Image (tube, rainbow, N blue to C red):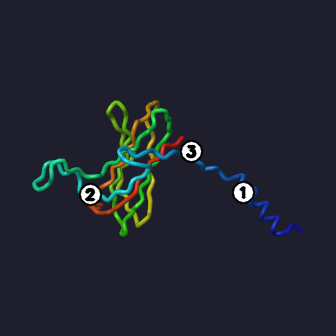
């Protein structure tokens, strides 16, 4: 008779060999004009341009750029947004891959509803044979004004 402990141990060992390994080799990208690899922001009103009673040079804070090291050759990029608000919020999230020729590919464009501390990931792949120099996350939307979030981007092999 086989003891139950041996049976369960053998079964667990056999199952572990058949499960796929889902390890990613990802590196956090540095925030441009900032410190570290993530940033927390509160959504401000959008860029105002020229409006009465708005100071000249007023700009919204919807855009954040992340730098890609020149020697890196990432296959794809993963952006993560996590709500830092106390209430649910609808964030309009866009992710762009920016290239040295002045062009950019929008690889994500959705309104994401997040509960407090909930996160959402978005993935973008560069053009074949062409590595971007920055990843831009644009987070905003009129319904998100006043709500906070934390974002980061990773480059993955």
Q: Indicate which disc, 2 or 1, sits on the residue closer to the N terminus.
A: 1
* Residue 67, quarter of the rendered image: top left
- Most extreme residue toward the left is 52
Mark 2 vs mark 1, foreground winner is 2
User: Which quadrant: the C terminus?
Assistant: top right
154, 75: nearer the viewer = 154
* Residue 53, quarter of the rendered image: bottom left
SS state under label 1:
helix
Tell me, for residue 79, which label it has, or none.
Answer: none
Mark 1 crowdedness (10 Å alpha carbons): few <14, some 14-19, many ≥20? few
Vertical placement of residue 156 versus 92, above or below: above
Q: Residue at x 48, y 42 (%)?
A: 76
Callout 2 touching callout 1 (CB < 8 Å): no
Callout 2 touching callout 3 (CB < 8 Å): no
Q: Which residue is mark 2?
A: 44
Q: Which residue is mark 3?
A: 25
- Most extreme residue toward the right is 1
Mark 1 vs mark 3, foreground winner is 3
Mark 2 crowdedness (10 Å alpha carbons): few <14, some 14-19, many ≥20? some
Count of number-bearing discs: 3
Q: Which residue is mark 1?
A: 15
Mark 3 crowdedness (10 Å alpha carbons): few <14, some 14-19, many ≥20? few
SS state under label 2:
loop
SS state under label 3:
loop
Q: Indicate which disc, 2 or 3, sits on the residue closer to the N terminus.
A: 3
Q: CA distance from mark 2 to mark 3?
A: 34 Å
- The percent coordinates of residue 27 (x first, y second) are 51, 45
Q: CA distance from mark 2 to mark 1?
A: 50 Å
- The percent coordinates of residue 30 (x first, y second) are 43, 45
Q: Residue at x 43, y 31 (%)?
A: 130
- The percent coordinates of residue 4 (x first, y second) are 81, 69
């Amino acid at each position: 008779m086989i003891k139950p402990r041996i049976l369960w141990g053998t079964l667990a060992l056999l199952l572990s060999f058949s499960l796929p390994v889902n390890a990613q080799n990802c590196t956090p990208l540095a925030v441009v004009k900032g410190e570290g690899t993530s940033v927390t922001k509160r959504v401000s009103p959008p860029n105002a341009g020229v409006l009465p009673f708005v100071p000249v040079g007023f700009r919204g804070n919807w855009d954040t750029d992340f730098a890609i090291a020149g020697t890196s050759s990432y296959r794809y990029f993963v952006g993560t947004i996590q709500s830092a608000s106390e209430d649910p919020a609808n964030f309009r999230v866009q992710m762009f891959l920016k290239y040295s020729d002045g062009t950019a590919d929008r690889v994500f464009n959705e309104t994401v509803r997040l509960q407090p501390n909930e996160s959402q990931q978005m993935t973008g792949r560069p053009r074949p044979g062409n590595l971007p120099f920055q990843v831009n996350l644009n987070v905003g939307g009129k319904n998100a004004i006043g709500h906070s979030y934390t974002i980061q981007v990773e480059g993955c092999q």
